[in-house]
């Protein structure tokens, strides 16, 4: 088997990567969505071929930290292909300590993490607003909108008591950051801010509202559930692997 490491995807590669992803999805009953590059520099891709057929694909997505993920054709698993690709990509990580990501439902994902010697595990949830009714706001707050999409919230004084950052992509709105100043936590401020944001988004005709949250952040999970969000997906991250 031949293994190639590329700094960008071009030529015939997108078609064969999609074909491999479709084959894996059909066989496993899981949707595989390959990352084939963005605007940021520092991405790397591993392609493993056998007799000119792509049987394994993995990527290192540049970030803080870098993230590695991918998949292997079902007929070629248990041959250490994915472990080999991850180790090859790890050498290109900027900080030298990337995260290895996937889903518990991915065949062999846990065993691969074990083989790589991963010692730290965390889980992130993708949550989507699923309620038919909007939550009722508990507090009347003033707000100011910044150019980057951040909404600053105020109570009585001039200093903000919290903020919410939004990212738009057509009919999709991603709530990227919900922050309440420490002195105002436990007073219903986070709930009130989200009530306001949800009302604003629905008023704009936004039909798909999502956010991501750490699986260990129990207060945030409780808050989002109270506001009408439900867990739609989850991703597991392993780090500190050899």
Image: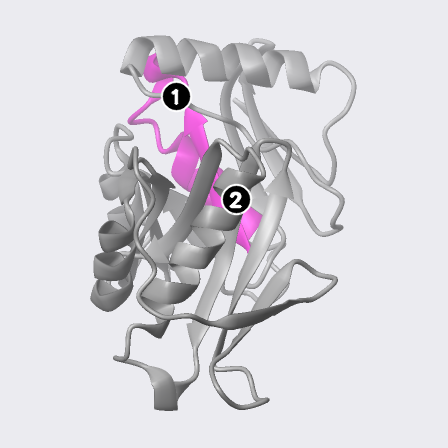
Please report the bounds of the magenta region as a residue range. Answer: 66-90
Q: Residue 120 in the image: x percent, y percent?
A: 29, 63
Q: Nearer the viewer, residue 80 or 201?
A: 201
From the viewer's perspective, is 150 left or right of 29? right
User: Residue 186 — which label?
Assistant: none
From the viewer's perspective, is 166 left or right of 121? right
SS under mark 1: loop
Q: Is residue 14 above or below residue 113?
A: above
Picture residue at 74% right of the left edge, 35% below the top: 8
70 in the magenta segment: yes
Picture residue at 67% right of the left edge, 46% below the top: 43
- The residue that disc 2 covers is 201
From the viewer's perspective, is 123 left or right of 147? left
Q: Quadrant of residue 152?
A: bottom right
Picture residue at 36% right of the left edge, 56% below the top: 213
Q: Residue 123 in the image: x percent, y percent?
A: 29, 53
Q: Nearer the viewer, mark 2 or mark 1?
A: 2
Dot 1, crowdedness within 10 Å: few (<14), some or many (≥20)? few
Q: Is residue 237 above or below residue 76?
A: below
User: Residue 31 — which label?
Assistant: 1
**Of callouts 2 and 1, which one flags the residue occurring earlier in the amino acid sequence?**
1
Q: Is residue 143 above or below residue 110?
A: below
Picture residue at 58% right of the left edge, 34% below the top: 46
**CB under 8 Å between discs 2 and 1:** no
Q: Nearer the viewer, residue 153 or 236?
A: 153
Distance from the alpha carbon under mark 2 to that under mark 1: 29 Å
Dot 2, crowdedness within 10 Å: few (<14), some or many (≥20)? some
Q: Nearer the viewer, residue 178 or 21?
A: 178
- Quarter of the image for the C terminus: give it: bottom left
SS under mark 2: helix
């Amino acid at each position: 088997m031949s293994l190639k490491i590329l700094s960008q995807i071009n030529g015939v590669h997108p078609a064969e990567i999609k074909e491999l992803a479709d084959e894996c999805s059909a066989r496993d009953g899981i949707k595989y969505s390959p990352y084939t590059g963005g605007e940021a520099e520092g991405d790397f891709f591993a392609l493993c071929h056998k007799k000119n057929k792509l049987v394994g694909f993995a990527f290192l997505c540049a970030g803080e930290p870098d993230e590695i993920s991918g998949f292997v054709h079902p007929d070629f698993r248990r041959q250490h292909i994915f472990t080999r690709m991850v180790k090859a990509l790890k050498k290109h990580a900027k900080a030298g300590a990337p995260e290895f990501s996937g889903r518990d439902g991915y065949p062999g994902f846990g065993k691969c993490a074990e083989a790589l010697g991963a010692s730290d595990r965390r889980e992130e949830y993708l949550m989507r607003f699923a309620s038919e009714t909007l939550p009722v706001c508990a507090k009347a707050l003033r707000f100011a909108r910044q150019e980057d999409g951040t909404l600053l919230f105020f109570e009585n004084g001039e200093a903000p008591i919290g903020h919410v950052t939004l990212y738009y992509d057509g009919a999709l709105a991603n709530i990227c950051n919900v922050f309440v100043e420490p002195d105002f936590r436990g007073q219903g401020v986070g709930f009130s801010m989200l009530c306001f944001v949800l009302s604003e988004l629905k008023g704009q005709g936004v039909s798909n509202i999502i956010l991501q949250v750490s699986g260990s952040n129990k207060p945030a999970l409780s808050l989002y559930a109270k506001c009408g969000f439900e867990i739609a997906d989850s991703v597991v991250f392993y780090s500190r692997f050899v």
